[in-house]
Amino acid sequence: MRPLAVTQFLGLISLTVAMDNGLLKTPPMGWMAWERFRCDVDCHDDPENCISEDLFRDMADRLVEDGWRELGYEYVIIDDCWMSKLRDEQGRLQPEPTRFPGGIAKLARYIHDRGLKLGIYADMGTLTCMGFPGTTLDKIEIDAQTFATWGVDYLKFDGCYSNPVEQMLGYPLMSKALNATGRLMAYSCSWPAYLGGLPPEVNYTLLGDICHLWRNYDDIQDSWDSVQGIIDWFSNNQDHLQPAAGPGRWNDPDMLIIGNFGLSVDQAHSQMALWAIMAAPLIMSNDLRNLDNRARAILQNKVVIAINQDPLGIQGRRLLQERNRIEVYWRPLSQSASTLVFLSRRTDMPYLYHTSLAKLNYEAGNYEAYDVFTGSTVTGLNATTEIVLSINPSGVVMWYIYPEQSKQTETLHYQHKKTSRFTFL
Ligand code: GLA
């Protein structure tokens, strides 16, 4: 072990803050195939849903025509199961020809022509998680080069079928190899998820230097249990995770599953709200061709998107876990604003929760709050005003809070209106 550890260390020193290339100053937004479409390769019996160039073209069309792109959803990301089982004669990865007859470069052009960006999946190891060709250490350069040649804009680099020593070498090497191509590519690392997600196994400072985002924890599934498990893990470990995030370096609690089968409307509000608190990537995995209007409204809510994309890029935290099973989350935002999310973990009925801004660490002063999912504004709040909220079971109330308009704060408030990506009532 010793000599290897030294080599690794030297290898890392030679990296110059590899991924500080100006990309992803706010969390990425887009669409990814995995959670909804998995490894469906059966284009004969399931042509609409199989992993094929048609699926990605369909989703790109929807992103453009249904208003997603204008809201910031710009990445179309291919996940596992796009590859042929064999590399080509030159050792390059190639797409499975019957499902991607036009090749990835052509798909990239289609996506770029529509003002979108293309993401792709590879795996640091001997095989991808679903058994397609992996990127072993000797293949890192050629794969980075292939992706650049195709016009790829984002790489999700998974970690199945490799050990921690190989990962320690491979993830930084891929960062360097992507940089060396000269093409700007966002780099998403699954590394921490394979190391248990926490220090000392995971070095979040190093990770922030080499990756733009990283998966810390288990895969999301189409259920409220799964969403709750993720929220709990990220909150229980927030002292390690929260300081690691910032512009160009994001924790990734995994895809948004809103619009699928597992969440109620309230639970969908909760996922969206908590992903905004966590400054998480807003990467949907759903069927944009068949989305009901309520799911669409939640995913397209401009205020929650603006909160998620706040330019300060400070990840939020869980402030309180009450014995009555209400939890309070908080995230500071630019221009003296902040957001509060009140999440009910109850399973009985809407709960009347009493609190005040002072109890939630707010300083004396006058505030206004915009209720993100109802669109109403609460005025005349000061820190000690008693607040009573009705929170649905497994739902949230989400407030965007800012200093009240007054002579002193008029300019600030005006700036809010002018610079925010949404308009107040
Ligand atoms: C892992 C990842 C998932 C997905 C699958 C594909 O489980 O965590 O997000 O990419 O592999 O096989």
Image (cartoon, rainbow, N blue to C red):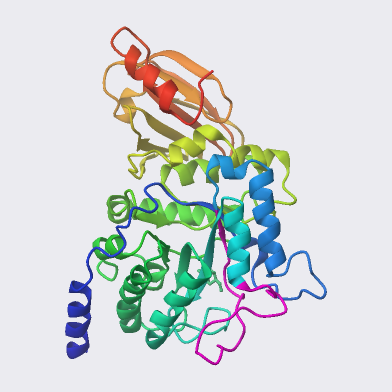
Asked if residue 182 is positioned above or below residue 357 in the image, the reply reads below
| Residue in the image at 35% along x and 45% along y | 315
| Residue in the image at 59% along x and 62% along y | 109
Does residue 139 show up? yes
Residue lying farthest to the bottom in this orientation = 89
Q: Is residue 281 or residue 26 the one in the foreground?
A: 26
Q: Is residue 331 or residue 55 the one in the foreground?
A: 55
Whether residue 384 sits left or right of residue 342 in the image: it is: left
Asked if residue 413 is positioned above or below residue 18 in the image, the reply reads above
| Residue in the image at 63% along x and 74% along y | 103
Residue 224, percent from left and from top:
59, 52
Q: Is residue 162 or residue 22 the one in the foreground?
A: 22
User: Which region of the structure is painted magenta?
Assistant: 75-103
Whether residue 225 sits left or right of residue 174 in the image: it is: right
The quarter holding residue 368 reads top left
Residue 78, percent from left and from top:
58, 66
Asked if residue 290 is positioned above or below residue 411 in the image, the reply reads below
Q: Main secondary structure of the magenta part?
A: loop
Q: Check residue 393 for magenta coloring.
A: no
Q: Is residue 310 or residue 359 the one in the foreground?
A: 310
Does residue 327 show up? no
Whether residue 20 sits left or right of residue 268 in the image: it is: left
Q: Quadrant of the C terminus?
A: top right
The quarter holding residue 166 reads bottom left
Q: Quadrant of the N terminus?
A: bottom left
Residue 376, percent from left and from top:
55, 20
| Residue in the image at 31% along x and 23% along y | 358
Residue 338, percent from left and from top:
37, 31
Asked if residue 329 is positioned above or below residue 138 in the image, the reply reads above
Residue lying farthest to the right in this orientation = 45
